[in-house]
Amino acid sequence: MKSYYYLDTSAQVKYYVSEPGTAWIRQLVDAVNPDTGQRVNQLFTAAITVAEAAAAFAVIARTGRISKRIRDRTFDRYMKTISVYFHLLPVTADLITMAAHLTQRHPLKGYDAVQVAAALRLQQTLGPDRKLVFVSGDGTVVTAAQSEGLTVDNPFWHVEESE
C-alpha cells in the first residue's frame, strides 16, 4: 500500500543539501519495495516549488554553506530529478485564492500559503481513505497545515545526534 506525502520546499531542499533532517528525508524519498523495486511513497509538491528550491540553493551558496560549483551541480540534479521524484501540482487562480484566505487565518508567507493550499486540495482529491502527510521543516507552516486538518511531519523531529 502506497503512502502519500506532500513535501514543501524546506523539506525538499534537505534531500539535496545536507542539513539537520536530511537522513530522514532521503529515506522517505528513496524508499522502495525490495520485492518490486517500486517506490513506496507517492510524493507531491506544487509546481512553484521548483522556483523556490532553485532560489534556496542560490541563497545557500551566497551565504557560503556550499560552493558555487556545488550549487550548480545541486541545481542541475534537482532540475533533472524533480519530476521523477514528485508529482508537480499546478498552481491555479483558485488555489491562489485559497492560499490568500489561509494568510488571513495563519501567519504564512505567500508561497507557504500556496504550499498548504495545494496540500489541502490534494487531500480533498485523494479522499478520506488515503491519508496525505504534509512535510515541512518550517514550524509556522507545520502549525498552519495541522490546524487546517492535515496530518503533518517535520524533518527536524527525526534529527539524529550524528546529523
Image: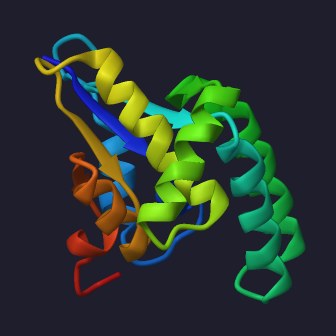
Q: Does 83 sit above or below residue 77?
A: above
As drawn, is 126 to the left or to the right of 46? Answer: left
Q: Residue at x 17, y 21 (%)?
A: 130
Q: Residue at x 54, y 54 (%)?
A: 113
Residue 39: x and y, percent? 33, 23
Regarding residue 39, the answer to whether it shows in the image is: no
Residue 64: x and y, percent? 78, 89
As drawn, is 104 to the left or to the right of 159? Answer: right
Residue 155: x and y, percent? 32, 66
Q: How many marks?
A: 0
Image quadrant of residue 23?
A: bottom left
Q: Residue at x 85, y 83 (%)?
A: 62
Regarding residue 40, the answer to whether it shows in the image is: yes
Image quadrant of residue 70?
A: bottom right
Q: Nearer the viewer, residue 111 or 69?
A: 111
Query: In the rendered view of the protein, which quadrant contains the N terminus?
Result: top left
As drawn, is 62 to the left or to the right of 156? Answer: right
Q: Residue at x 30, y 68 (%)?
A: 143
Q: Nearer the viewer, residue 104 or 7?
A: 104
Q: Nearer the viewer, residue 16 or 122?
A: 122
Q: Does 118 sit above or below residue 134?
A: above
